[in-house]
Amino acid sequence: MNYRPVLVSAAFLFLFAVIGSGMVAYTHENTAERIHDNERRALLKSLHELIAPERYDNDIFHDVLYVRDRQLLGTDKPVAVYRARKNGWPVAAVIAAVAPDGYNGSIRLLVAINLDGTLAGVRVVEHRETPGLGDAIETSRSDWILGFRGKSLENPGKEGWKVKRDGGQFDQFTGATITPRAVVKAVHNALLYYRQHGKELFEQHPEAASQS
Amino acid sequence: MLTAMIAIGALAGLFGLLLGYSAIRFRVDADPIVDQIDALLPQTQCGQCGFAGCRPYAEAIAGGEADINQCPPGGEATIQALADLLGVDPKPLNEEHGEHGEKMVAVIDEQTCIGCTLCIQACPVDAILGAAKQMHTVIADECTGCELCLPPCPVDCITMVPVKRDISQWKWPYPEPDHPEIAEAGK
Amino acid sequence: MTDTRTIIRDGLWTNNVGLVQILGLCPLLAVTGTFINGLGLGLATMATLIASNVTISAIRSLVRPEVRIPVFVLVIASIVTVIELLMSAYLYDLYKVLGIFIPLIVTNCAIIGRAEAFASRHSVLPAFLDGLSMGLGFMLVLVTLGGMREIIGHGTLFSHAHRMFGNLLPDITIVFAGDYQGFLLAVLPPGAFIGLGLIIALKNIIDKRLQARASRVTAAAVPAVQPGH
Amino acid sequence: MVTLLEKPATFPGGLHLPSEKSRSLTEPLTSAAIPARLHVPLGQNIGEPAEAVVKPGDKVLRGQLIARSLGYISAPVHAPTSGTVRDVGDYPVPHPSGLSAPCIVIDSDGEDRAAETGLQMDRVYEADPADIRQRVRDAGIVGLGGAGFPTAVKLNPGPDHIVDLLVINGAECEPYITCDEALMCCRPDDIIEGIRIMRHALRAKQVVIGIEDSMPNAIECLRKELERVGETEIRIVAVPTRYPAGGEKQLIYTLTGEEVPSQGLPIDIGVVCHNVGTAAAVARAIHHGEPLISRVVTVTGAGVARPRNFDVRIGTPIGDLVEQAGGYTPDVARLLMGGPMMGFTLNSDRLPVIKTSNCILAASRAEAPDPPHPQPCIRCARCADVCPASLLPQQLYWYAFARNLEKVQDYNLFDCIECGCCALVCPSHIPLVQYYRFAKTEIWDMEREREKADLARRRHEARLQRLEREKKALEERRARARKALDKKPKAGDADAKKAEIAAALARVKARKKETQAATGQADGGNGDGN
Amino acid sequence: MAELALILVSTVLVNNFVLVKFLGLCPFLGVSRKLETATGMALATTFVLTLSSVCAYLANEYLLAPLGLEYLRTITFILVIAVVVQFTEMVVHKTSPLLYQVLGIFLPLITTNCAVLGVALLNVQQDFGFVESVFYGFGAAVGFSMVLILFAAMRERITAADVPEPFQGSAIALVTAGLMSLAFMGFSGLIKG
Amino acid sequence: MEFPTHSSPYLPLRNDLSRLMATVMLALVPGALAMFWFFGWGVIFNLVIATTTALLAEAAVLRWRNKPVRAALLDGSAALTGLLLGLALPPLAPWWIPVIGSLFAIVIAKQLYGGLGYNPFNPAMIGFVVLIISFPLQMTLWSPPGGIMGLEATGFLDTARLVFTETLPAGASLDSITMATPLDESKTLSSLNLTWQEILSDPRFGNYGGYGWEWINLAFLLGGLWLWKRDAIQWHIPAGMIGSLFLLSLLFYIADTDSFASPLFHLFSGATMIGAFFIATDPVSAATTPRGRLYYGAGIGVLVYVIRTWGGYPDGVAFGVLLMNMAAPTIDYYTRPRVFGQRGEQDD
Ligand SMILES: Cc1cc2nc3c(=O)[nH]c(=O)nc-3n(C[C@H](O)[C@H](O)[C@H](O)COP(=O)(O)O)c2cc1C
Ligand SMILES: Cc1cc2nc3c(=O)[nH]c(=O)nc-3n(C[C@H](O)[C@H](O)[C@H](O)COP(=O)(O)O)c2cc1C
Ligand SMILES: Cc1cc2nc3c(=O)[nH]c(=O)nc-3n(C[C@H](O)[C@H](O)[C@H](O)COP(=O)(O)O)c2cc1C
Ligand SMILES: Cc1cc2nc3c(=O)[nH]c(=O)nc-3n(C[C@H](O)[C@H](O)[C@H](O)CO)c2cc1C
Ligand code: SF4
Ligand code: SF4
Ligand code: SF4
Ligand code: SF4
Ligand code: FES
C-alpha cells in the first residue's frame, strides 16, 4: 500500500486550513473592536429612545445588573437592569421585563422607569404576536406603546392598569385583547418590582456583562 | 491568530489523513450506469443522436457529454425513462437530431436489387441476407429501421415501410378526451 | 462553449441559479422579505461566488479527488467568514437582519455547485466571469422576489435602505398606498414559495415567447439564405 | 386442500345489474340455418393461431380438419359444414380492433356431409387421461366461457398438481346472455356427460356446478339429469346473483372461500374451472366424434325482433343470425359481441360467429347509450368500492392516463379482469376499462419492443465483434504479407522493438565496420558510395 | 424529558426546518421527484444530520470554546460535516453496496444542505447541551424527512396532473411547497415561550 | 349494416358528477339556513360574493388556457368551493375578503394544478387559510349570534353598508357589533385561568357548545347524514374525524375536567360538523383507499383537537384538513388494499 497520497491529501488540507483560518483570524483581529462597538451602539440606540442621552453620563452599557423575579418580571431567567446616572446620581432604570402571556408566547420588553417611579417609556424588543393583529405593540405599527410614557403606579390607580374591555384605562386593539392585556400587565408588574426593589437596584455594583 | 491557524490546520490535517487513508482503504470501481442507460435506448443503432450507435451515446450521457433528448427513435418515452433513471427533468426531443416517427422496416425490391452487398456492410445488426451478385432480402423481424442501408444502395431499391401490425399486436387506442367544446372554444 | 457571452447569458438567464438550477433556495426564500435584504444577501453571495470561483480555478489542478470537496468547502467557508466579519463590522443592521443566512452562504448549493461544475474545469478568467454572472443572476432574482414581496406584503419598496447604505442615502422608501393594510401572506414563508413559483412560471412564459419569435425569425430567414448555397 | 363452503362466500365489490335475460328465453333453443358461405378465422383461441392445411378449391367435409394447431397453446380448426374452400386469406373478424385476420372461406354445398373424425372413444372411464386430452385437443375445443383458452391445456394439471375441485361455471352473470342457461335446460345430458369425462381426465376429487340463483329452471334440469344418470358425486350450488359472479376467481371464491393467487391460476390452489358449454363440447367430441364446429349463441336486445338462442355453426355471418331472429327493429343502434359489460362493439354484421361468441346483442340507444362526455376523475373511489379484484381503479386510471406504465403495474393492472364495474359507476363517465386495456396492450407492446431491442443489441455487438475480428484478421494478413515481403519482424511490443532497434544498431555497426574495412582496403576509393 | 419532547415537537412541526425555517430547500426540491429516492435521501439526511450535529457540538465544546475561536465556527463545522459525509460515503460504498444503492448517491448532496450546517450553528446559538444537540439534530432531520416524503408523494401525483404549461416542473413544485408551508402555519403558537 | 364502436361497458352509466355536486349543495342548505338565522345577512353576502367570484375566476382561467368553459362551470365544483368558503367566513367581513379567498382557492389551489380533480389541497380551505393568516382582523368579525343576551343580528342595510363600504352603523364600534366566537373566547378565558365550568356559565355558551353554534352544527350534521344516505359520501372520513376528536377530547376531559373542554363541546362547536361531512370529504384532496380514508379522517380529528387546545388559532378544521391533504398521497400509498388473491403482504 502506498501511503504517499495519504500524506499529500493531509498536507493539502492542512495547508488550506492554515491559509483560510489565518485569513479569517486576521480579519477577525482587525474587526473585533468595531463589531463589539456595533453591538453596544445597537443597544444604546434603543435605550436612547427611552432615556435621552443628555439625561445621564455613565457608561450605561456596562452599568448593568441581573435580577430574578419570576412573579413580577415574567421569567425564570435573570433579567438585565440598565442604570442611568448623572454625576453618580441615579436617574432611571431600564428593566428588560417579559410579558409571558402574549397570544403566541412571551413578549420581551424594555421598561424604563424614572427615579420617581414614572415611566420613561416602554418598547417591545421581541414578540411573536399575530402579524396584523397583535403586532400593533411595535412602534412601527402604531403609537399605542408610547401611551405608557409618564404613567405610574398611582396614575392610573390599580383599577386603571387594565385594558378598557376589562374596565381599565388602556386601549385594546380591535379584535385583539390578549396582547395589550399582557403588555399592560407586564408593565404594571415591572413598576411593582421597581417599587419593591428600586433602592437596591441602584446600590449594587455592576456585574460583569459576561455573566448571563 | 496563531492558535487559530494551528488548531484548524491540525484538525484539517487529521481529517486529510483520515480521508486519504480511507480513499485507499475503501476504493471501489465505477458503477455500471452505462449499462443501465444503454438498456433504455431503443438499439436502433441509427446514429441520429450523433454517436456511432446506442452504446457510445449511453457512454456520452453517463459522462455528462450528451443530453438525454437526442434519440429520435426512442422519442418521449425514452427521454422519460432516462430522466427517471438519472433523476433529472425530462425535456422535449431535440429536433436537431430528427423527429420521432412511426416504426419502419426496410424492404428490398428484389426485382431491382443487383446484389452489390453494399447494404449488408451498412446494416448495423446484420439484418440483410444475401451474397454477392445475388438478390438480397431484409429479415423484417431483425431490422431496426435505422435507414443506414438506404444511402449506400446504388440503385435505390430499398424502401422503408411502416411495420405491419397484425391482430395480435394491435393496441387499444388511448381514449380520446374529445371535448366538442374545445372546438367551440377554439373558434 | 466558454465564450464570454454564453457565460453571461447562462448566469443571468438560461442557467440562472435561482430560476433554472433551483439552487441556493434557502437564502433566496428566507431573506427576501424586502428588496434591501435581498440586495444585501445578493451582494454578499456574489462576492463569495466570485472569490471562490477564482480561488478554486487557480488551485484546480492541485487538488486530489478524495479531498476535493473538503478543500472547496474550506476555501468557501474562509471567504464567507471573512465577509461575515466585515459585514458585522461595517453593515451591522443588515447583518442582524440576515442572521444565520450569512454563514449559511457556505452551504448555498449554488456556490459549491459552480465550484464543481465550472471553476474546477476552467481557467481563472472565465471562472471569474462565471462567478460574476451567476452571482448577478442570483442577485437579480433575490431583489425581484424581495421587491415583489415587499410591495404586496407591505405596500412599500426600498424600505430600510439605511441597513445597506447607512446614512449615505436619505430614506428612499416608496410608499404605494398610505392606508394599505398589507397582505401578510406575501411576507410569510408560504408567500416566498409561491412568489418564486410565479416568477419561474413567468420566466417560462417569456422563454416560450422568445422561442416562438426566434423560430419565426429563422423561418423567415431560411429562404433568404438558401439561394446563396 | 380446498373444500366447498356450506354457505356461499361474498367476493368483494360487484354490482347488481338488470338481468334482461327473460327476453331471449321465450323461444326454445333451435339450430340456425347453415349459410351459403362461412368465414372461419384461424385464430379463435388464446395463443398461436392455427395454420391452414387446405387450399382454395379443396373439397371439405363437416368436421374435417382444415387448419392445424401450432404449438402447445393452440387449437385446430375444423370445417363447420361440407363444401368447397373458396379462399384462404385476410378477412374482417370479430375483434375490438375491427381488423382483418387470416380466415378460411368455405362455400357450403348444402349437403352437410360429415367426415370421419376418429374422435369417439368407448369405455371412456377406463381410458388414459392423456388419450382423452389428445382427443379434446384434436377436436379443437377451447373454453366457451369467453376467453377461448385451449381446453386440453386446462385438462392437464401437470404432474405436481392435484385437482381437488372441478368447478363447472354455469353462472352466466352478464345481463342479456342466456346461451348457457338454454344449454343447461335443453341439453343437460351432454353437460353432465362432459363433466364426468372431465372429472375422469383431471382425476378431480370433487365436482361442483355453480349457477346463479336467478336460474331455477336450469338448476332443476341439471338436478333431474343427475338423478336420471344416478350421479351423486356432482353438486350443484346456487350462487347469489351479483355481477361478476361468473368470473372464474370470483366463482371459486364464492364456492370455496379461497382466493386464486394474484396473477396465478386456479390450479395453484387445486381448482380447475370450465364452462358448461365447454363440458358439453367435450361430450360431443368424445361420444359423438364431433369436433367444435358449432356453439350456442344468444341473439338478443331491443334491436332484434325475436330474441332467442341458436345452435350456430362457426363461421356463420351475424347478419344471417339476426335475420333468423326476426331481423332488426327500427330501434337498433349498436351491435355488440358478448354482453354489455365485457363485450365489444362490431362495426358490421357481416362478421362471422366464432368459438368464443356467446352473444350477439343488437342494442337500442336506450339500452346502450353513447357514453356521456368524460370529466376529470374526482377520486371519489366509487370505482374502488365495486371492484371485484379489490384494485384501486382510480389510481390505475391516474397512471394510465399519464401513460406511466411502470406505476400502473405497481398498482396491479394485471389483476384487473376488465369486468367494467368501475366504469359503470364512475360519476365522471371515464372510460376506465379502455384505459386499462390501452395500458395492458401498451405494456405488452413495450415488452415486445424490449425484446427486439435486446436482439438488436446482441446482433449489433456480434457484428462489432465480427468486424473487429475481421479487422484483426485483415491486419494480420496484411502484416504477414508485409513480413513476407521484407522479412522483417514487425511486432508491437516493447521487447520486440528493443530487439529491432538493437538489431538495427548492430547492422549499422556492422556496416560501419564493413565500410571502414573497405575504406581501409581501398583507401578512399568509394568513400561516398551508395 | 418534557423539554426534549418539546424540542422534537418544535423542530418537527412548529419550526419545521424546511417549511418554516427555510433550510435544506435544495434537496427538498431536487430529490423529491420520486418517492423512493426521497425516502433514500430522507434516511441519509437523518443519519448525517444527527451525526454532524453531535460532531459539531464536540468540536465547538472541546476545541473552539476553550481556545476562544468561536469566530471560526463556520469553517470548523463545515469541515467536520464535509468530512463526515465523505467518510460515510466511502465506507458505505465499500462495505454495503446495497445500502449504497439506496443512500450513496445522496450523500455528497448533503454537504451542501443548509440544514446540516444550520443545525450545527443553531445548536450553538441556543446554547444546547449534548443531549439537546442530539435531539435537535434528530428532530430537524425527522422534520426534514417527513416533509420530503410527503412532498415526494404529492409530486408523483402532480406529475400526472394537467398543470398549465408555464407552471410545469419546478414552478408548480414551489407553489405546492408554498401551500404545504401554508398548512404548517397551523402549528404556529403550539409551543409558547 | 354498419355500427358505431367504442369500449365496454355499454349499459347506461349510473352516476353523474354534476348531480353529485348538486346533492352536496342541497345538503348544505339546512346548515346555511341555521347560520343565516343566527348571523343574519352577512352569511348571504359571503355566499353570493364567494360563489360569484369562484365562478368568474374559474371561467377566466379556463379561457386563458383555451379549455371548454361551460362544461367546467356546469359541473358545479367551482360553485361548491365558493359556497363552502362562504360558509367559513365571518359574516361581517368586508366584501374583498370572500373575493380574495375565492381567487386564491380557484386560481392557485385548483386551476394551477389543472382544475377539477387535480388539486392536492382543498381549495376552499386554502382560500380560508390564506385569509386567516393574512387578514386576522377581518377574519374575526363575527357578529354575536342573534338572540344572544337579547341582541339582534345586524340588519340587512347595516350589514350591506358594513360589508361594501366598511362604514359602521351610527354609534357603533367594531367591537360593539362583533364578538369573539365561543372557541376563541374559550381560549381567552382559559388563558385567564378560568375553569371550564366557569367558562360555560358565560352567556356566550349554550348547553354544551357555543350559543347558536350547537344548532348550526346540528343542522350540518343532518345534511351530512342525508349525504351519506344518498351515497354521496362514504362513512369513513366523518367517522374517523368525529371519532378521534371525540375520543381524544374525552381522554383529556376525564383527566382534567377543569382545564379541558368536554367532547360534546368539541363536536358541536366551530366547524366540526361541516368539516367532517362536507370539507374533509372533498374526494379530490382526501385519501381514497378505505383504510386510508379512516386514517385520514382520524388524523384531521387529532389535529383539530391539538390546534384548538394548544395552537395559535381558535379552530383547527382548515389546518387539519390541509395538513392531512398533504399526507393523503402518502397515506394512499401505504394503505393500498390487499388485492384480491394477494397473500400476506398487506393485511387489513
Ligand atoms: C388567527 C388569529 C390570530 C389572533 N392573534 C391574536 C393576537 O396576536 N393577539 C391578540 O390579542 N389576539 C389575537 N387574536 C384574537 C383573539 O383570539 C381574541 O379574539 C381576542 O383577543 C379577544 O378579542 P375581543 O376582546 O376583541 O373579542 C387572534 C385571533 C385569530 C383568529
Ligand atoms: C397465459 C395464460 C396461461 C394459462 N395457463 C393455464 C394453464 O397452464 N393451466 C390451466 O388450467 N389454465 C390456464 N389458463 C387459463 C385460465 O385459468 C383461465 O381459465 C382462462 O384464462 C380463461 O379465463 P377467463 O375467461 O376468466 O378470462 C391460462 C390462461 C392464460 C391467459
Ligand atoms: C367478469 C367476468 C365474468 C365472467 N362470467 C362468466 C360467466 O358468467 N360464465 C362463464 O362460463 N364464464 C364467465 N367468465 C369466464 C370465466 O372466468 C372463465 O374463463 C371460464 O369459466 C373458464 O371456462 P372455459 O375455459 O371453459 O371457458 C367470466 C369472466 C370474467 C372476467
Ligand atoms: C362530498 C364533496 C365534498 C366537497 N368538499 C369540498 C371542499 O371542502 N372544498 C372545495 O373546495 N370543494 C369541495 N368539493 C367540490 C370539489 O370536489 C372541489 O371543488 C375540488 O376539490 C376541485 O377540484 C366537494 C365535493 C364533494 C362531492
Ligand atoms: S439515435 Fe437512438 S437509436 Fe439511434 S443510435 Fe442513437 S441512441 Fe441508438
Ligand atoms: S435492414 Fe436497413 S433499416 Fe433495417 S436495420 Fe439493416 S440497415 Fe437498418
Ligand atoms: S369512480 Fe370515476 S371519478 Fe370516482 S374515483 Fe373512480 S375513476 Fe375517479
Ligand atoms: S374493470 Fe378492472 S379495475 Fe374495473 S372494477 Fe373490474 S377488475 Fe376492477
Ligand atoms: S441553499 Fe439551502 S439547501 Fe441549497
Image: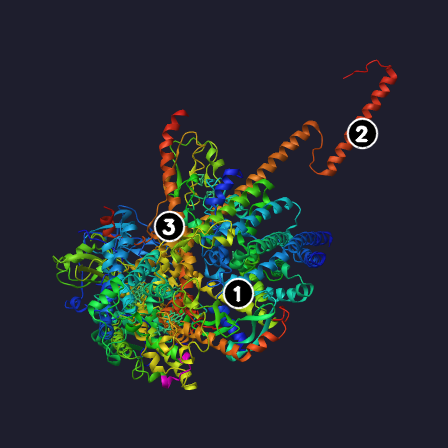
Direction from residue A21 to residue D334 in the image, left or right = left
The mark lying in front, picked from 1 and 3, is: 1
Disc 1 marks a residue whose amino acid type is: Leu
The span from disc 3 to disc 2 (Cα, nearest Å) is 78 Å
Front-most of residues D235 and F315: F315
The span from disc 1 to disc 3 (Cα, nearest Å) is 52 Å
Residue E166, numbered circle: 3
**Which residue corresponds to mark 2?**
D506
Which x, y percent locates residue C91? Answer: 55, 54
Which x, y percent locates residue B44? Answer: 45, 44
Disc 3 marks a residue whose amino acid type is: Pro
Q: Please report, as a chain letter, where disc 3 is located.
A: E
Which x, y percent locates residue C109? Answer: 53, 54
**On screen, residue A155 above or below C206:** below
Q: Characterize the local packing of mark 1: few (<14), some (14-19) or many (20 or more) Cα atoms within 10 angstroms.
A: many
Q: Characterize the local packing of mark 3: few (<14), some (14-19) or many (20 or more) Cα atoms within 10 angstroms.
A: many
Labels 1 & 2 near each other (Cβ < 8 A): no
Distance from mark 2 CB to nearest ligand 5 atom below 8 Å: no
Q: Which residues are magenta?
A: F190-198
Residue A192, numbered circle: none
Which x, y percent locates residue E186? Answer: 41, 69
Front-most of residues F200 and C193: F200
